[in-house]
Amino acid sequence: MPVRLAGQDTRRGTFSQRHGVLVDVETEEEYVPLAHVNELQAPMRLYDSLLSEYAALGFEYGYSVAAPDAWVGWEAQFGDFANGAQITIDQFIAAAEDKWGQRSSLTMLLPHGYEGQGPEHSSARLERFLILAAEENFRVVYPTTAAQYFHVLRRQSCAARRIPLICATPKRYLRMPDTVSTVDELTSGGFHEVLDDGRNPDGVQRIVLCTGKIAHELRAERDERDSPVAVIRLEQLYPFPGAQLLSILARYPDDPKLRWVQEEPENMGAWGFVRGRMIDLAGADLGLEVVARPASGSPATGSHKVHEEEQRRIIDASLS
């Protein structure tokens, strides 16, 4: 299958995490290692785009429609950069199948995660995509390990039904040991829509539901404090994996205390969506509480110090 990935600084990765294209310092000749794995392989193409999300995403969307046999992806330097392409998202990616029967399997890689870099570099606005997600017109995922990330992209390329994929990809994962996967985990198995904690359910007094980067911080602090808390990760938000989640919850003691934990303000992120799905799933929200930043008009604070204080408060409230 041909692979095409474009975006700002995509060939080397915004923070030099990708060595997609090597350049000879003397001759300036370029070499793409993944384009030379096998003589019979399909083309592997990586492109650096200009800082015009509207034009770049629009082109990649059009390419994905015209080349249904290719895996086509657009990568933003930060998730909020998708704001500049909102017209393309609303008018085409989200609505084209409904309007014209026009299908796309475009993948959007949107760095998302609160790391103290301010309002412009924290949120990919998951809540917007979850609002647009209905009738299985999107897949929205927030994987937490390298294997999960690999398998969800592989699933996207092999899926029979062509649907756009929204994938949250935090920058901190690049240097976070907890996200590392073994070679066996990469070469076998598949994508898991929900990840259980893996600990003995006996003695668990509280279950924390979350998605993405915050799970690693919660698990690390939980282990440090030896708290009787299980952390369950929703790796896929839409379509909502209700059956898998109920199956995992059934492993734990009856009537557990449930908390949804997120980094985003309470009026943003996945909270509103998840609460609605839990009500649909169980006929009630199961007493689900939320731990989040206070509702806000801004996605994040502009102060790194305030960010650290807010993050610590979320961790404490989740495990207390």
Image (cartoon, rainbow, N blue to C red):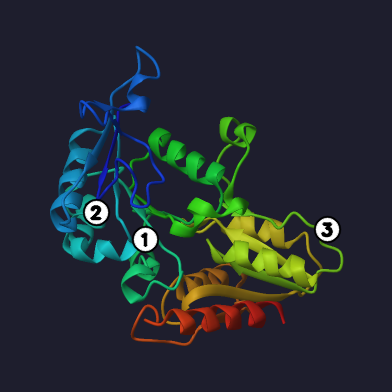
Q: Residue 93: which disc?
A: 2
* Residue 199 position within the rendered picture, expressed as x and y whole percent measured from the top left: 79, 57
Instruction: Give neighbour class at mark 1: few <14, some 14-19, many 20+ (Cα, 10 Å).
Output: few
Q: Quadrant of residue 259?
A: bottom right
Residue 187 position (above or below residue 287): above
Q: Quadrant of residue 226?
A: bottom right
Q: Earlier in the sequence, mark 1 or mark 2?
A: 2
- Residue at x-position 59% and y-position 83%: 313
* Residue 161 position within the rendered picture, expressed as x and y whole percent measured from the top left: 37, 40
Q: Amino acid at mark 3?
A: Asn
Q: Give SS at disc 2.
A: helix
Q: Quadrant of residue 282?
A: bottom right
Q: Amino acid at mark 2?
A: Ile
Q: Give SS at disc 1.
A: loop
Front residue of 318 and 253: 318
Residue 165 position (above or below residue 84): above
Instruction: Give neighbour class at mark 3: few <14, some 14-19, many 20+ (Cα, 10 Å).
Output: few
Residue 283 in sight: yes
Q: Amino acid at mark 1?
A: Ala
Q: Residue 134: which disc?
A: 1
Residue receiving disc 3: 200
| Circle 3 or circle 2, nearest the eye | 3
Residue 286 position (above or below residue 190): below
Q: Earlier in the sequence, mark 3 or mark 2?
A: 2
* Residue 109 position within the rendered picture, expressed as x and y whole percent measured from the top left: 36, 51
Query: What is the quadrant of the C terminus in the image?
Result: bottom right
Measured Cα–Cα span from mark 3 to mark 2 = 43 Å
Measured Cα–Cα span from mark 3 to mark 1 = 36 Å
Q: Is residue 304 left or right of residue 120?
A: right
Instruction: Give neighbour class at mark 2: few <14, some 14-19, many 20+ (Cα, 10 Å).
Output: many
* Residue 54 position within the rendered picture, expressed as x and y whole percent measured from the top left: 15, 57
| Circle 3 or circle 1, nearest the eye | 3
